[in-house]
Each structure stands twice: as structure tokens, then as C-alpha cells.
């Protein structure tokens, strides 16, 4: 092998006032290939994961090297040196934090409205306002039977029908009370399940914080773990209103109502001191969902602590009114045996779940105004007239629940539209467009060919110089 002469070395090198040497061209080409390789890897990753759920588009950011490093054949850089090629400054996910936060807030509203509409629909179905077995229909049947009795007080068939319709009314109250109890039990189970699900998501976010932090310390960012963490936060947002505070060192810090539930690798798990309360760890601070928001947890808590107690109280109040007012009029009348002062319903059982009739025989119904005046049916007429004041209460109860169902459905529709719009905007930033990626790939292919041409030209010049 022949060693290059001083003349050849001089030709390969660059005078002190010249910005570029042939050897620096090789270095620039090498760095260009590495940088383009990183960009093409990002593009290939995007294309491969175009249909992967939760995947965020990757981007490689390049920057120019501003100095030329001196070497064996390269003199120290001069003030006007153009640089030594590109370098990769960032390999990152494309996300818009503001859009992510807005979408999460909309998901919280949508999740809460959807769950509230579901629970209220079950409650509305229990009231059965449009069926013959509904409470209002049962009241109308009972008072209608009393009206028939006022017109035919001696008809034993009519009297038996009154007792049958009274049993239908008490059964309607008892059945509705049982269904409210079942709905309460089911909602308590749903709340416990939501709490367990939320705690699992919180633990997973904390674990990913640790994994991402360790990868960052090792010099290789774990972008797939970041995508997974964002998916978990999205699921968590449907359960409760979560605020995200990103931190490069500690990862995501999650807060709910000002209480931190995730900080770095530490979590504050949700606790249930009883079946209708959710607290943050052992702090004693309860989760207060507000009137219309709060995610699925908020809807379940409102149902348990507000909606069901309100409906139960109104139902028991109506049962007590029926028992008290019917008994008050029945006790003033006389039955076919001449007895008076007897109650129609058991006066000691005035709740919806315990209500039952006390009259045990058709002839014991006190329909007469006097023992010796069979044509006087004032008590039966007055009891029948109670329909005007009591039946509307049952209708109002069903209507109030139906109104809440409509409001929750309207909120769900509005929040779903908002969430879909924001999600579409967020995907416009983080989603993968195959057309765009293919166009980028063609552009990178051309850049690669151009860089190869620079290297080929440098090789030809070097060969020419060496042959000289």
C-alpha cells in the first residue's frame, strides 16, 4: 500500500480560510444518512400503526450542526464554517395538550350523562307510567271501583271488585318499593365496581409514570408507554373529572376536585366508608360530584344520595296520604252490618313497602252515610273523589322522573357531540394520515438520493485527487 504524499494530503485538506474540506463532506453525508434514517423510521412507524388504537403520530425533529470538528485531515473550524450536517434533536409524539384536556372534560360530561340517563331510565321503567300496572293507573282503578260502589252499594260483585282493586293498589306500591330497593342495590354495586375500576386505572398510570421515567433516564423515551398512559387517562375521565398536570421528571400528576390522586409513582386510592360515599384515601374528604357533572361516579352518587331518596320519600308520602285520607272517610261510614269507625287500610302500615288493606270482606266496606239509610252513599262518593287530589301526585312523580331522563339524554347527546368534535380535532394532530405519510416517505426518499449523490460526488473527487 502506498501512503498519501504531503501533496495529496494538502489536496484533501482545506486551507484555514476555506469553510469545507472533502473529509467534512463524508462526515456530513454520514450524519445526513443517520438523520434521514431516523425520519424514515418515524414515518414507517406511523404507517405501520395507522390503525392502532390510541397511537400518537411520531415526528423526528432535526437541527443543523453549527461547527466542524477538526480531525486528521481537517483543520480547526473557522468563524464562517457552514456546519457539519444535521442531527436529531427530538423524537416525539404529536399531541395538543389543550385539545386533550378539553376532550377529557367532554368525556367526563358524556360519561356522567350516559350513566345518569341509564339509571333514570330504569327508575322510569319501575314507575311504569304508561302501563295498566303503573301506580297512577292503579290509583284510578281503585277510585273508579269506589265510584261504582257509590252507584251500586248493595252489589256484592262491585264490593268484591273494590277489594280486588285495593289489593292491586297495595301491590303496585309494594312492587314499586321493591324495585326502588333493587335499583339502589344495583347502583351500589355499580358504584363499588366503578371505584375498583378507577383505582386500577390510577395504579396503572402510576406504574407507567415509573416506566416512562426510567426509560427517559436511560436515554430512550418510551413513547408507546406514553400512548398507553393517555388511553388510561381517557378511560379515567369517563369515570370522574380528572385534571392532568404533565411533568417531565415525575410524569403525570392527576387531581380530582383539587385532591391529588396520582403523583409520580404514588397513588391516593378511592375509599368507600359506606355504600353511598366515596372518599380520597384516608383523608376523610368526600368526592362531591356537583349537580350535573362528575362522570359515572358522580351520576351513581347523585342517584344514591339524591334521586332515589327523593323518589322514595315522595312514594312513601303518597302511600301515607292514600292510607290516611281513605281511612278518615271510611271510618265515618257504615258497612252492611251496621258497623262504623273501621279503617279501610291498615293504619299502622303507611309506607309504600308495608301498605295493605284492613277490610277483610266485601260487606265490611263502609259505603253508607247512615246505618238506616242505604241510599246515602256519601262516604263512598267522598272516597272516590280523592282521585282528583291523589292521582295527580302519582302522575307528577312519574313526570318528574321522565323529565330528568330527557334532560340527562339531552346532556348526553350534547356532550357526545362535543366530545366527538374535540376528539376529531385531537386526532387531526395525533392521528396518522396515510396519504400524508406516503407523501412524506417519497420526499424522504428523494432526500436520501440527494445525500447519496453528495457522497458519490465526494468519492469521485477524492478518487481523482488520489489518482493525481
Image: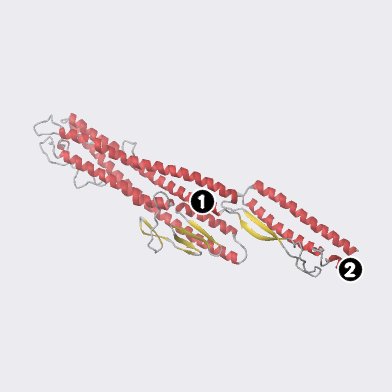
Q: Earlier in the sequence, mark 2 or mark 1?
A: 2
| Relative height, residue 221 to residue 446 (above, below) | below
Residue 55 location (% of width, % of height): 58, 53
Q: Is residue 375 left or right of residue 114?
A: left
Residue 444: x and y in percent read 72, 52
Residue 1 visible to an observer of this rendering:
no
Image quarter where the C terminus lies is bottom right
Q: Residue at x 32, y 47 (%)?
A: 180
Q: Secondary structure at mark 1?
A: helix
Q: Residues within 10 Å of mark 2 (few under 14, many from 20)?
A: few
| Residue at 18% over, 35% down | 382
| Spot occupied by residue 26 in the image (x, y as percentages of width and height) | 79, 62
Residue located beneath label 2 in the image: 7
Q: Say if 4 sits above or below 442 in the image.
A: below
- Element class at badge 2: helix
Residue placed under numbered mark 1 in the picture: 102
In this view, the residue in front, 338 or 296, is 296
Name the residue: 53% across, 57% down.
229
Q: Nearer the viewer, residue 232 or 244?
A: 244
Q: Residue 466 vs residue 135: left or right?
A: right
Is 258 in front, or is 333?
258
Q: Is residue 112 visible?
A: yes
Colouring scheme applied when the structure was drawn:
secondary structure
Amino acid at each position: 500500500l502506498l501512503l498519501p504524499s504531503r501533496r495529496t494530503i494538502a489536496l484533501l485538506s482545506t486551507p484555514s480560510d476555506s469553510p469545507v474540506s472533502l473529509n467534512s463532506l463524508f462526515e456530513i453525508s454520514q450524519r445526513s444518512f443517520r438523520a434521514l434514517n431516523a425520519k424514515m423510521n418515524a414515518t414507517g412507524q406511523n404507517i405501520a400503526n395507522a390503525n392502532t388504537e390510541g397511537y400518537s403520530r411520531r415526528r423526528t425533529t432535526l437541527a443543523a450542526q453549527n461547527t466542524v470538528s477538526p480531525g486528521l485531515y481537517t483543520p480547526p473550524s473557522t468563524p464562517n464554517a457552514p456546519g457539519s450536517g444535521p442531527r436529531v434533536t427530538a423524537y416525539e409524539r404529536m399531541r395538543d395538550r389543550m385539545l386533550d384536556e378539553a376532550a377529557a372534560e367532554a368525556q367526563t360530561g358524556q360519561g356522567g350523562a350516559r350513566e345518569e340517563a341509564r339509571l333514570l331510565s330504569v327508575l322510569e321503567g319501575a314507575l311504569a307510567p304508561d302501563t295498566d300496572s303503573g301506580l297512577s293507573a292503579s290509583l284510578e282503578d281503585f277510585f273508579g271501583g269506589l265510584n261504582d260502589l257509590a252507584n251500586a252499594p248493595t252489589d256484592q260483585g262491585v264490593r268484591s271488585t273494590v277489594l280486588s282493586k285495593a289489593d292491586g293498589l297495595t301491590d303496585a306500591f309494594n312492587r314499586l318499593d321493591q324495585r326502588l330497593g333493587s335499583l339502589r342495590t344495583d347502583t351500589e354495586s355499580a358504584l363499588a365496581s366503578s371505584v375498583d375500576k378507577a383505582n386500577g386505572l390510577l395504579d396503572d398510570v402510576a406504574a407507567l409514570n415509573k416506566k416512562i421515567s426510567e426509560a427517559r433516564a436511560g436515554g430512550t423515551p418510551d413513547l408507546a408507554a406514553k400512548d398507553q398512559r393517555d388511553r388510561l387517562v381517557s378511560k379515567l375521565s369517563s369515570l370522574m373529572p380528572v385534571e392532568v398536570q404533565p411533568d417531565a421528571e415525575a410524569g403525570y400528576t392527576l387531581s380530582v376536585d383539587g385532591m391529588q390522586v396520582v403523583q409520580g409513582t404514588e397513588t391516593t386510592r378511592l375509599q368507600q366508608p359506606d355504600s353511598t360515599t366515596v372518599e380520597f384515601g384516608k383523608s376523610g374528604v368526600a368526592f362531591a360530584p356537583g349537580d350535573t357533572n362528575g362522570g359515572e361516579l358522580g351520576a351513581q352518587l347523585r342517584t344514591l344520595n339524591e334521586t332515589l331518596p327523593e323518589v322514595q320519600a315522595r312514594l312513601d308520602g303518597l302511600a301515607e296520604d292514600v292510607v290516611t285520607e281513605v281511612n278518615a272517610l271510611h271510618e265515618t261510614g257504615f258497612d252492611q252490618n251496621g258497623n262504623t269507625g273501621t279503617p279501610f287500610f291498615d293504619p299502622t302500615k303507611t309506607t309504600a313497602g308495608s301498605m295493605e288493606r284492613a277490610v277483610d270482606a266485601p260487606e265490611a266496606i263502609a259505603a253508607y252515610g247512615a246505618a238506616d239509610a242505604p241510599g246515602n252513599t256519601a262516604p263512598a262518593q267522598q272516597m272516590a273523589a280523592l282521585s282528583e287530589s291523589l292521582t295527580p301526585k302519582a302522575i307528577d312523580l312519574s313526570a318528574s322522573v321522565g323529565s330528568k331522563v330527557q334532560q340527562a339524554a339531552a346532556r348526553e347527546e350534547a356532550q357526545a357531540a362535543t366530545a366527538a368534535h374535540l376528539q376529531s380535532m385531537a386526532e387531526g394532530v395525533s392521528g396518522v394520515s396515510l396519504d400524508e405519510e406516503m407523501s412524506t416517505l417519497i420526499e424522504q426518499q428523494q432526500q436520501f438520493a440527494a445525500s447519496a449523490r453528495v457522497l458519490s460526488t465526494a468519492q469521485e473527487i477524492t478518487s481523482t485527487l488520489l489518482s493525481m
